[in-house]
Image (spheres, helix red, strand yellow):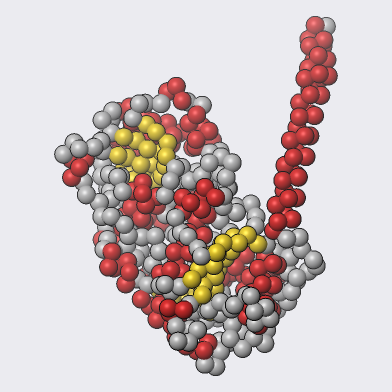
Amino acid sequence: MSDSSPAALRVAVLADSDTRWKWGALTALRIAPGAAVHGYLLWGRATPTQRQLAEVGAEADELTEVNAVEFLAEQGRRATGEDPALPPFDVLVLACVGGTTQAMLHGLARAWDGVERRPAVVTGYVGVVYEKLSDGLLLRHGADLVLANSPYDERRFRAIYDGVGAGSASVTPCALPFLGGTRYDPGPAERGERPTRVVFAVQPSVPEGRAERSYLLGRAMAHARRHPAREVVLKLRSKPSEHTTHIEELPYQRLAERQKEEWPPNFRLAYGNMGEVLDGTDLLVTVSSTAALESLERSIPTAVLTDLGVREPLGNHYFIGSGCLASWDEIDDGALPTADPDWLADQGITRDAAGVETGFATARGRLAALLERRAGTGLPPLAPYYTPRTAPGYLPRLLARHGLDPKGEPLAAQPSAAAEAGLRAASRKLLRRTARGAYRAGAQRVAPLIRRWGQL
């Protein structure tokens, strides 16, 4: 059996956050069923914790934490066969933010220069693409396959690539790998076998402000008070000490804890895998989370909130035409939005398990053709749209942030992921020591002085 046979595929997934690891690992298993998956977690702000990895539920045969330069060096050794203990990969899935993906494409092009049979490179988006479309998409150009999660995305991706003269041959229709699951059955709630469950799926960065987040939290609690027979669940993305794809400055759980005495008895917080939470959900409420697509795929009534307006910064403008836009007032009055079937179809929402699986057929076929070419004449060198010639004022700075020069080569000796972890721990220790010193100085010196001034 050749090494490019689907049963023998070795797939690497590089991810820089919990949600991107989930997308990358599940996508790898969808487009290369039965493959052995080696995961690489890119060290940084959003490197997932063990709890987050367990919650995601996407496992790998091996899992390693690395920085960008370490990762690139290892992929070079694997592809050249320099180290017999490191067999080459057949496929590499880049599940990272756009800038990191672009840096890896340039770094891999250098690492694989002259390699006879480099791996096929796949990338894409973890969910709804509602902002920075051209920026993020052009940063992903250069991969062999750029996965589009829906017919709508496929049209947009091709238009942008063709519009800048980059070529859109890499754009490949696909589906979100975490769609599917148990189809919604309203029977148990209607028969009174369990309470009707309303789940408010919150997001780390949408909305951003304290007032808006407090407002939405208050409305969820108010809905629980108005409907004491319902169960209202605040579905959280992460714990306050953890980071996600997006920065969360004001975690909902901290806002909620300050109002603990005001919680209705039928209101609670929940972590956990979104699929498991959706198994018992009768109405999903969100501002613009990709969880809405998971909910709609299961035929669960889904409300995309309009309370704060339908605005691009919120991302809920993406759902215009969906039939899902609603306010908390309407939800309080019993509204159950009905999704528009044409909109669903354009978003790749089939409401059918077989349909979700079919969504990966084209990607599997395209990948098989790439692997066949790889086994024969080999794949051409990676060729991103951005180069030092096409983007001389943009690309060098972007690559430098990942320790690479404009040619994709390491700028200098970079600290390992383990060393970076130690450095961050030392920095946190120093910060805590400095904070304690500042507190003592304030309590022992400044406060008495202020009290004396107050007595003058």
| Residue found at x 46% / y 79% | 8
Name, please, the residue furthest toward the left. Answer: 191
Q: How many discs mark residues in the rendered view?
A: 0
Q: Quadrant of the N terminus?
A: bottom left
Q: Is residue 346 left or right of residue 399?
A: left
Q: Is residue 356 left or right of residue 390?
A: left
| Residue found at x 28% / y 50% | 300
Q: Which is nearer the eye, 426 or 445?
A: 426
64 shown above or below 236: below
| Residue found at x 27% / y 68% | 354
| Residue found at x 46% / y 25% | 260
Asked where in the image residue 235 lies, by quadrant, the reply is top left
Q: Which is nearer the eye, 320 or 420?
A: 420
Asked where in the image residue 297 lies, by quadrant, the reply is bottom left
89 shown above or below 196: below
Name, please, the residue furthest toward the top. Answer: 455
Q: Quadrant of the C terminus?
A: top right
Res. 14 visible in picture: yes
The x, y position of residue 208, in whole percent, is: 54, 42
Asked where in the image residue 443 lies, by quadrant, the reply is top right
